Image: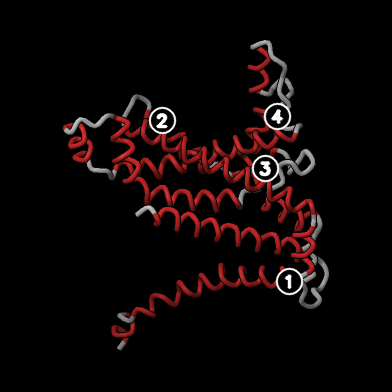
Amino acid sequence: MNRNIMERWWVWIIPLALVLGIFFLYPLLNVIRLSFSNATIGTIEDGFTFENYIHILTGSGFWQVMKVTLVFVFASVLFQLLLGLITAILINKDLFGSSLVKLSMITAWVVPGIITGVIWSIMYSSSSWGILNYFIRLLGLNQIPFLYTPSWALFSVVLANVWRGTGFSGIMQYAALRGIPDQLYEAASIDGASTWQQFWNITLPQLKPMLMINTILITIYTFNTYDSIFALTQGGPGNSTTVLSLGAYKQVFRYLNLGRGSAYAVIMLILSGTFTILYAWFMGSDQ
């Protein structure tokens, strides 16, 4: 009898369903519920309201945050994919130092965001210990206020995030490159295909499924990034580096507004889902 029960598929699904329900589905539904309330930390929520979404969507500050978020996500994803692909191709050729590069890529990926922010804040510093400005001064140029002007601050947080995420993209694309049969390149060489033609007609089509997965993952991950930005600029100067995730963090932990912070989180969820669907549709439409 016990053996027959263990052979039923639902016996193995129930523990997974419980874990997903308790740790993922319930928090998600609770955040959605809180987004339609006036809940704050230390007070009891009172009724159902659209006030959070109305306040967010009609406020001028939200669209500035949205603009910063889109620039941050687009630039981060683009350069992580591009630099990850270049790095993957180079280490796939087993050049000298490839093993060290692989280790460096993994190390950058696993470093916590707060630590990433601290490391880069030291590098960006205008003080004597600021590494980047030290070399800029050696060249006889004026030091750059990386974290103190809006345009440079946004560039700086994007650069730090690209450094952090390129290793993940590179490792994923390197794994996909290792799975491409050598016979395809040998046949293309015999037919007289150039290196660029081999890359365009063999490498990229073979990498397409991994590129889609990679793009979706790093887009969602970048949308949720707030820790490295918080350590670098805390969203400043002004709101020039405040992204949606940092806006949600500020609403909950600085202004103690659970309802409005939850509304920010729901908007992030909708945007992440929309981009995921668009990526999947775009990659599938070419097949």
Q: Nearer the viewer, residue 163 or 81?
A: 81
**Mark 4 neighbour density, 10 Å: few (under 14) some (14–19) many (20 or more):** many
Residue 100 numbered tag: 2
Position of residue 69 measured from the top left corner of the image (x, y, whole percent): 65, 47
Q: Which structural element holds mark 3?
A: helix
The amino acid pointed to by label 2 is Leu
Q: CA distance from mark 1 to mark 2?
A: 50 Å
Residue for badge 3: 229
Q: Which structural element holds mark 1?
A: loop
The amino acid pointed to by label 3 is Ile
Residue for point 51% across, 71% down: 19
Residue for badge 1: 36
Left or right of residue 171, residue 32 in this image: right
In the displayed structure, would residue 62 be above or below residue 107? below
Give the mark, 1 or 2, whose residue is nearer the N terminus.
1
Q: Quadrant of the C terminus?
A: bottom left
Give the mark, 2 or 3, whose residue is nearer the N terminus.
2
Residue for point 42% across, 33% down: 87
Give the mark, 4 or 1, whose residue is nearer the N terminus.
1
Position of residue 170 measured from the top left corner of the image (x, y, whole percent): 43, 39
Q: CA distance from mark 4 to mark 2?
A: 29 Å
Left or right of residue 282, residue 89 in this image: left
Task: Tell me where residue 141 sits by quadrant.
Answer: top right
The amino acid pointed to by label 1 is Phe
